[in-house]
Amino acid sequence: MDKEEKIFYQNQKVVIINDDFLTTNLIPSNSIDLIVTSPPYNVDIHYATFKDNIPYEKYLEFTQKWLEKALELLKPDGRLCLNIPLDKSKGRKEEGFQSVYADVLSIAKKIGWKYFTTIVWNEQNISRRTAWGSWLSARSPYVIAPVEVIVVLYKSKWKKTSGTGISDITREEFIEWTNGLWSFPGESRKKIGHPAPFPLELPKRCIKLFSFVGDTVLDPFLGSGTTLIATALLNRKGIGVEIDKKYCELALKRLLNEGNIFQKKLHELIK
């Protein structure tokens, strides 16, 4: 596809790019203020055109490649909010389960990312993760954490000096969200039409806490478009990259229906 074909949708607020994030050349280096994303988890979630059950070593190689690309695109004071699982409990027990959070963080630091903090997200619903292993027995019980994490990384300097300098976060939000334990429910796969959607509350908090009004926010794995809905509602510029055209269509549909990107003062809808 040429450049025009890869730009699935564009207006003054958002851009949807139908392309592979690892190879796309449509986003300039040093142009992004904040990345908010939840990449494929490698836990056998059934996407339309992506296999989410590749060998763990390949998953880590993929993780390193996209983190390198993301680092290149950020401004020097740019930040990344990365939603990933704490661990991976599927796999061969004899070889040990996978500490996804620890492994991804280690890769990020190795390639140049600087670590700031980790926010623990209590999804308040662990029904989809229920698995006891050996019921009422010490033979092989499972211990499953009902949480995910949001790792906050940055490129070169934490203090933000670029952008408008205008924040839209309230006093109450700032006090609550700077507490490293966030509790709000996850999103329904059936309702959204995507196998791994995250709720609007997640990008909303990250965007208001870690970016200024007017900043450019990128989601390199756009999926159902939740991050771009948040950017439109919060008066940021949003760029989403999605390799699957089906999900580009879903993201645009949600933007038009839920984000209503052509109205004014959209941020009032989710204050």
Image (cartoon, rainbow, N blue to C red):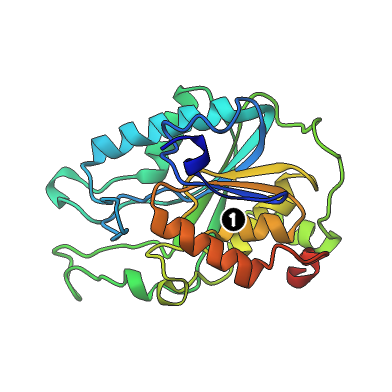
Which residue position is annotated with label 1? 227
Q: In this rendering, would 229 be left or right of 55?
A: right
Q: Say which residue appears at 76% left-offset and 31% top-offset.
A: 159
Foreground pick, 99 / 271: 271
Q: Position of residue 142 (x, y in %)?
A: 25, 63
Q: In this rendering, would 89 be left or right of 113?
A: left
Q: Say which residue appears at 69% left-offset and 41% top-offset.
A: 216
- State whether residue 181 appears in this view: no
Q: Quadrant of the C terminus?
A: bottom right
Q: Residue 199: name its quadrant.
A: bottom right
Q: Quadrant of the N terminus?
A: top left
Establish if 189 lies above or below 209: below
Q: In this rendering, would 214 be left or right of 29?
A: right
- State whether residue 245 appears in this view: yes
Q: Residue 35: name its quadrant.
A: top right
Q: In this rendering, would 117 be left or right of 126?
A: right
